[in-house]
Amino acid sequence: MTGLTQRRREPGEEPRPDDPDREPPYLDLDRLEARAREVLAPPVYDYYAGGAETESSVQEAPQAWRSWRLRPRVLRATQADLATTLLGTPVGTPIGIAPWAYQGMAHPDGELATRRAAARVGALMTVSTSATHSVEEVAAAAPDAPAWFQLYRQHSPEHTADLARRAGAAGYRALVLTVDLPVLGRRRRDLRNDFALPAGLRMANHPAPDDRPALSANASTSWTFDDIARFAEISDLPVVVKGVLRGDDAVACARAGASAIWVSTHGGRQVDLVVPSAHALPEVVDAVRGEVAPDGSDVEVYVDGGVRAGSDALVALALGARAVFLGRPTAWGLAVGGADGVAAVLTGLSEELAHAMTLCGVATPHDATPDLVVRAGWLPR
Ligand SMILES: Cc1cc2nc3c(=O)[nH]c(=O)nc-3n(C[C@H](O)[C@H](O)[C@H](O)COP(=O)(O)O)c2cc1C
Ligand SMILES: CC(C)CC(=O)C(=O)O
């Protein structure tokens, strides 16, 4: 406290920005977002927070998890252990970091800070093609910790193939093909703000300064199912297909050589009024049951979108996801607290998940089975 001039805070009142006792609210993601909003330039905040058209899918995503209800098991003397494997790689928590672009806008260390945080807490990070540090720089930030590389198409097919090859050479453990961006979604906030990467930041995986569009992943209208096996071969990595919302697509991806399917609406940033991940997940899990990855193991399923609490994550695991990934919450953590902020968000939600598991009699992520959840009948489906 700075002394007698400081007015006493009312219960529940937010500390003022100059309050030295102001601990970042890492366990309250709404307040954390509000804090991030204070430190980010408005167009940057809008880019991170926003979504397609009316943003109804952005708003609906967290609610959709809450249209499920847990059915706790009692008297199981459970101590939850979050450790699991993703494509054979051990991780300390099934909560990972989704790929999100331009992290240098949130913090000067950008992806390097996020990577160090992930390594510190034993979480898996997926690094975006549209990063402000190169594939190799991010790999070197925590060389022993597992990470995946997310691939977007570049202007030249050679450059796209080269990025896939570099990801394999730099030690990434999987290549994530994002397939829900044949064109960029209509994001009204970004259009209104004429959003562009701020001066001084670079798209480190793009080759030349003239390859610096305002906001572009070089839309991949040309990719087809055949590209799954092609990129697996080029990179020599298992391929995860991200942005699948239908069972038939999931099966087609698996049969085309995918090792895993990532259910995602891209954070509601592509198609508005899209089916929420929390409702698409069971269909995808059912469809790929029995499908086999190129290495002979079962095709894994992951999910992201609106996961904001440990119980959301437990519902996802019970519905058949092997991992859940966080986008915006890690952006708010990075903006407010750098690597410490990202680590605090991951730790906070992982602790909540462990707690929810213990309360529901679930010892490991694999013990989270579909009998643990039921649709809340009184809510709209
Ligand atoms: C600011 C931002 C940038 C993103 N950039 C990428 C990207 O480069 N590649 C990608 O595959 N997905 C990208 N996504 C989508 C995320 O990987 C993820 O699907 C989504 O954020 C999950 O939803 P959540 O933010 O509600 O947790 C981005 C999302 C956000 C919010
Ligand atoms: C460069 C962008 C297309 C990154 C992205 O996927 C997003 O903003 O949602």
Image: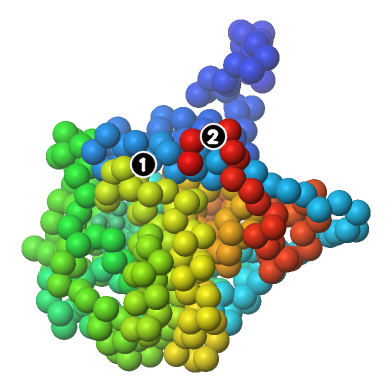
Identify the image quadrant of residue 60.
Answer: top left
Q: Nearer the viewer, residue 354 or 253?
A: 253
Query: Residue at the location (15% across, 72% down)?
Result: 222
Residue identified by numbered label 1: 57
Disc 1 CB within 8 Å of nearest ligand 1 atom? no
Tell me the amino acid under the disc marked 2. Leu
Q: Nearer the viewer, residue 261 or 121?
A: 261
* Residue 237 versus residue 267 in the image, above or below: below
Q: How many marks?
A: 2
Q: Residue 199: horizontal and vertical position, in percent?
A: 20, 48
Identify the image quadrant of residue 261.
Answer: bottom left
Q: Secondary structure at mark 1?
A: helix
Q: Residue 71: horizontal and vertical position, in percent?
A: 73, 48
Q: Nearer the viewer, residue 321 or 124?
A: 321
Disc 2 CB within 8 Å of nearest ligand 1 atom? no
Residue identified by numbered label 2: 379
Query: Residue at the location (74% across, 54% down)?
Result: 357
Tell me the amino acid under the disc marked 1. Ser
Kindly give the residue lying farthest to the left in the view shown: 210
Q: Residues within 10 Å of mark 1 (few under 14, many from 20)?
A: many
Mark 1 or mark 2: whose residue is earlier in sequence = 1
* Residue 47 versus residue 178 in the image, above or below: above
Between the C-alphas of marks 1 and 2, the distance is 17 Å
Q: Residue 257: horizontal and vertical position, in percent?
A: 37, 85
Q: Is residue 159 left or right of residue 179?
A: left
Q: Is residue 369 left or right of residue 359?
A: left
The answer to whether residue 91 is visible is yes
